[in-house]
Amino acid sequence: MLVFKFGGASVRDSYGVKNLLNIVNRFSDDLIIVVSAFGKITNALEEVLKLSLKETEECNSKFEALKTYHINIINDLFPDKRNLIYKEIEDEFSKLNTILFNEKYDSYDLKYDQVVSFGEIFSTKIVSAFLNTAQLSNKWIDIRKVFVTDETFREAKIDMRLTLNKAEDSFSFKNDKVYLTQGFIGGSKNGLVTTLGREGSDYTAAVLANLLNAEKVIVWKDVDGILNADPRYFNEAEKLDKISYQEAVELAYFGAKVIHPKTLKPLHNKNIPLCVRSFINPEGEGTEVDCFKQYDQDLPIYTLKKDQMLISLFPKDLSFVMEDELSKIFKYLSEHRIRVNLIQNSAISFSLCIDNANAKAKQLVERFKEDYKVLYNDQLELLTIRHYSDDAIKKVTKGRKIYIEQRSRHTSHFVIR
Ligand code: ASP
Ligand code: MG
């Protein structure tokens, strides 16, 4: 059995949905197909939600635009206007309307999940119905009733034990060969909808593969596979044919956008390979991530994290930065969920490099000023090169100002401007 995942970019219009059909038709395996919301619909739902809370007029037009987007796709895919999908989507939109405008929720995060999860409901209903009319018979599964999660809305944790039984029942492959379901969403024991964190559909595919012992997961992307560098920032990016789970985790952690970092653990635990392949060029072999490490060093791998802030702390009285000081610092960071991408210390200073993309970074600086002399720089970049060579480093740091440089056996990091 294989698990496929199609992200928003692969199904942003009716052409994408037809392409999905063509890809799936190339395989004769038992299959679970996990689909995200169409295109940028998750962002659009976030926006409608925000506007609905402000009770502005614009909200209605954004809601209508969202609806039109889906209706246009349906019109293209289903020439027969009697197809039940027209009514089904109409009904889902009226449910969404009620949640947005007529229901009260205790918290923003709770309402967020009830609203934003509709993206995946719309897309999977449409794709499933389309495949069925094209003789690719498949069963639509409501993953909100399979993935049992806690109620940490927007970041819900899956209860693997409770989910296992439900997954085995729902995806039994007794009478069906192909199942189609939603990425990114789940449901709590109390019947509330939850989401697993933005870009979480890869993770859904990985968890299903783990629970049901799939042979392989294939994630269909708009790139040929995992590249050794982000082509937006580096020239000469090359495809990696094979890498290990460990290498892929390093890549994802330090900024490669192709795979969601949470995806690898459930696969690694059961030794299930992950393939990243192109939906534009489905003949291509893509990249295979598995347990073998022998190819990891074939190419240097470059990742870049933008918008970094480098903060250096100096104790006011020149005392050493001791363990108890460090533990105070890390306690604060963990309480405020601030992720540290790199640290460096000397006898009398401690530096950390963090994402600067939110207000937390500024608050952190203010907080540190109470105890330390603080220096900081923002708008920096964190460049990581795995399997580096002097040449590789020279090529990408040329002309850049280097604030911090660290090298270990396989990895080098540069905080640069
Ligand atoms: N639709 C969700 C998002 O855009 C989940 C996903 O695409 O993986 O975040
Ligand atoms: Mg998406």
Image: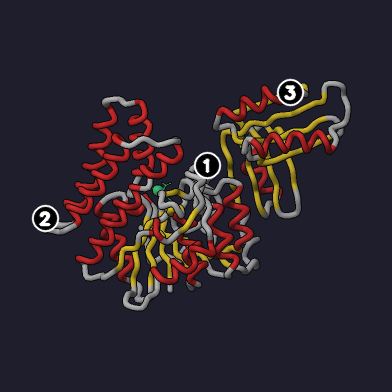
Q: Is residue 232 left or right of residue 173?
A: right
Q: From this viewpoint, is residue 76 visible?
A: no
- The residue depicted at 27 percent of the width and 39 percent of the height is 97
10 Å neighbourhood of mark 1: few (<14), some, or many (≥20)? Answer: few
Q: In what quadrant of the picture does the N terminus appear? A: bottom left
Q: Which of marks 3 and 2 is nearer the N terminus?
A: 2
Looking at the rendered structure, which numbered label has been put on residue 81? 2
Cα distance in 3D space between marks 2 and 1:
46 Å
Q: Which of marks 3 and 1 is in front?
A: 3
Foreground residue among 336 and 263: 336
Quarter of the image where one finds residue 361: top right
Q: Do the residues bearing badges 3 and 2 touch, measured as CB atoms within 8 Å?
A: no
- For disc 3, the marked residue is 374
Residue 104, given in percent of the width and then of the height, sits at: 36, 35
Name the amino acid type tagged 3.
Val
Q: From this viewpoint, is residue 405 visible?
A: yes
Residue 118, given in percent of the width and then of the height, sits at: 33, 47
Q: Is mark 1 on a helix, strand or loop?
A: loop
Q: Does the residue labelled 2 lie within 8 Å of ligand 1?
A: no
Extreme-bottom residue of the structure: 174
- For disc 1, the marked residue is 233
Q: Which of marks 3 and 1 is nearer the N terminus?
A: 1
Q: Earlier in the sequence, mark 2 or mark 1?
A: 2
Name the amino acid type tagged 1.
Tyr
Q: Is mark 3 within 8 Å of ligand 1?
A: no
- The residue depicted at 23 percent of the width and 50 percent of the height is 89
Cα distance in 3D space between marks 3 and 2:
66 Å
Quarter of the image where one finds residue 166: bottom left
Q: Considering only vertical position in the picture, is 238 above or below 56?
A: below
- The total of numbered circles placed on residues is 3
